[in-house]
């Protein structure tokens, strides 16, 4: 049975970590170009700007195999409204018990609704949420994306890139497993993070988190955010 924790753990990484690079001005050599803004200052501005985000559209893609994450890709809308846990809706593709599953999801009023390739939505009781992940962590200003941006260590601004036509600064750094695990249960190691921050308002447009996938292989989770603070209304499916 697909539990809310299995899906939301991957989604939050997302969300926390808030693809499509078209160009790069990454400097050569060991340090950032002198004409690029300081990475620490950019992240401080980005964290402050992200704390007030109320809604966003997301696209999530997992590259490689991450044992703790079942989702391969997902897309939808997130909002901090819609009950104590916020709300979300969209589509998801994941592997569960060796089977590939594609379907739609709605999270609202602390309930999860799932719809597979056939049949209608199935509702899972709110009582299941007592021991599973809280989706409000994605946009929660104290433990979500804003918190992760504030706690990235050794930040370096390494270039500028266009992300889906949006000019952005590219900043690399690291984050401890405790900071990431607050948003994504199952992360057991410190991680390397790259974030792309809008040049105009410093809000994140993309994040890429490098994760071990086992047997010496590497993997990553990419998330892009768009339509920030666009009106999003999510209701239980009929």
Image (cartoon, rainbow, N blue to C red):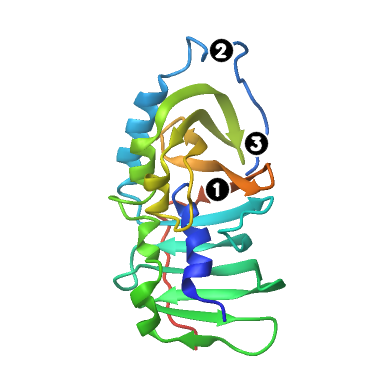
- Name the residue carrying label 1: 224
- Residue at left offset 55%, top offset 80%: 114
Q: Which structural element holds mark 2?
A: loop
Up/down of 186 relative to 88, above or below: above
Q: Quadrant of residue 216?
A: top right
- Residue at left offset 34%, top offset 39%: 47
Quadrant holding the N terminus: bottom right
Image coords of residue 51 (percent x, y):
31, 47
Residue 89 visible in the snapshot: no
For disc 2, the neighbor class at 10 Å (few under 14, some 14 to 19, many from 20) is few
Q: Give the mark toward the camera: 1 or 2.
A: 2
- Name the residue carrying label 2: 30
Image coords of residue 203 (percent x, y):
42, 40
Q: Quadrant of residue 26?
A: top right
The tally of labels here is 3
- Name the residue carrying label 3: 21
Q: Give the mark toward the camera: 3 or 2.
A: 2
Q: Which structural element holds mark 3?
A: loop
- Residue at left offset 41%, top offset 70%: 233
> In 3D space, how far apart are the residues under numbered discs 3 and 2 (Cα atoms)?
22 Å
Image coords of residue 88 (percent x, y):
45, 68
- Give whichever of discs 1 and 2 has the lower sequence position: 2
Up/down of 8 relative to 187, above or below: below
């Amino acid at each position: 049975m697909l539990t809310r924790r299995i899906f939301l753990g991957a989604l939050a990484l997302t969300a926390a970590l808030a693809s499509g690079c078209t160009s790069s001005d990454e400097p050569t050599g060991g340090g950032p170009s002198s004409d690029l803004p300081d990475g620490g200052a950019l992240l401080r501005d980005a964290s402050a700007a992200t704390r007030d985000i109320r809604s966003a559209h997301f696209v999530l893609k997992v590259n490689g195999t991450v044992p703790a994450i079942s989702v391969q890709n997902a897309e939808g809308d997130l909002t901090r409204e819609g009950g104590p846990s916020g709300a979300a809706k969209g589509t998801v593709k994941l592997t569960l018990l060796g089977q590939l599953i594609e379907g739609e999801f709605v999270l609202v009023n602390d309930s999860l609704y799932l719809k597979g390739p056939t049949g209608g939505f199935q509702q899972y009781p709110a009582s299941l949420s007592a021991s599973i992940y809280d989706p409000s962590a994605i946009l929660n200003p104290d433990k979500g994306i804003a918190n992760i941006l504030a706690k990235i260590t050794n930040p370096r601004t390494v270039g500028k890139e266009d992300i889906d036509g949006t000019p952005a600064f590219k900043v690399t750094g690291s984050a401890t497993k405790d900071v990431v695990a607050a948003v994504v249960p199952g992360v057991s190691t410190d991680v390397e993070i790259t974030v792309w921050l809008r040049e105009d308002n410093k809000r994140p447009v993309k994040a890429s988190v490098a994760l071990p996938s086992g047997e010496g292989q590497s993997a990553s989770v990419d998330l892009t955010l768009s339509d920030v603070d666009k009106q999003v209304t999510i209701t239980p499916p009929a």
